[in-house]
Amino acid sequence: MPSFDILSEVNKVELKNAIEQANKEITNRFDFKGSDARIELKEKELELTLYADDDFKLSQVKDVMMNKMAKRQVDVRLLDEKPKEKIGGDKVKQVIKVKNGIETELGKKIQRLIKDSKIKVTAAIQGEVVRVSGNKRDDLQAVIALCKSKVDEVPLQFENFRD
């Protein structure tokens, strides 16, 4: 029975490269000279921490990071920003979580969308992946087109297409 998986994950290599490029630009920019502006990436937790001397510089660091991510095709919809924190004096930091996998709520929404479309396939949530299986390849391709047009909260990838 043909099937495929719907998932949402970031390309970790491109994310790391974008962060390194952003840090390089921050160290070379004139308006950041002598400041403690930087971006740290914790790869295991997929968590970014932005540091800056004040709120304005923090927003500038975030802009540089977003531009570098856009150039490397890292979708910024995967970023979950936490509130800013003061860390002594005027210095501030902000933690940004990188979403990886489809959350249960979004998985249920995708499952409901597929069920309501009356396409003859079954969708099952398996951890952070939604597995779709059906009898015809055309039905599965219709589900892919439906998900691409209706789900825009996070970028979706369609993998493990099996006949």
Image (cartoon, grey):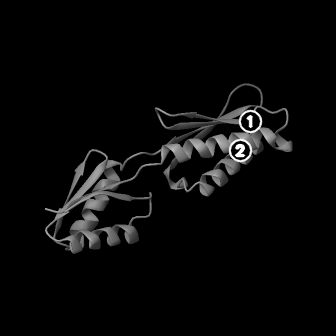
Where residue 129 appears, as percent x and y from the top left, is 29, 50
15, above or below 130, in the image: above
Q: Position of residue 143 (x, y in %)?
A: 28, 69
Residue 81 can be seen, yes or no: no
Q: CA distance from mark 2 to mark 1?
A: 7 Å
Sequence-first tag of 2 and 1: 1
The quarter of the image holding the N terminus is bottom left
Report whether residue 138 is seen.
yes
Neighbor class of circle 2 (other Cα within 10 Å; few <14, some 14-19, many 20+) is many
Q: Quadrant of the C terminus?
A: bottom left
Element at label 1: loop
Three-letter code for the amino acid on which mark 2 is drawn: Val
The residue furthest top is 88
Picture coordinates of residue 73 (x, y %)?
Answer: 55, 56
Which of the 4 image quarters holds residue 111? bottom left
Q: Residues within 10 Å of mark 1 (few under 14, many from 20)?
A: many
Instruction: Please report the residue visible at 48 percent of the width from the left and 48 percent of the height from the top.
Output: 11
Apparent side of residue 109 relative to residue 48 in the rendered image (left or right): left
The amino acid beneath tag 1 is Ala
Badge 1 is on which residue?
Answer: 37
Element on which disc 2 rests: helix
* 111 displayed left or right of 48: left
Position of 156 with respect to 72 (left or right) is left
Check disc 2 and report the residue beneath it. Answer: 61
Observer-nearest of 59 and 4: 4
Give the camera-side residue of 74 and 153.
74
Residue plotted at (52% across, 55% down):
75
* Among the 4 quarters of the image, the one containing residue 127: top left
Tell me if label 2 and label 1 are in contact, CB under 8 Å: yes
Identify which residue is drawn at 39% across, 52% down: 8
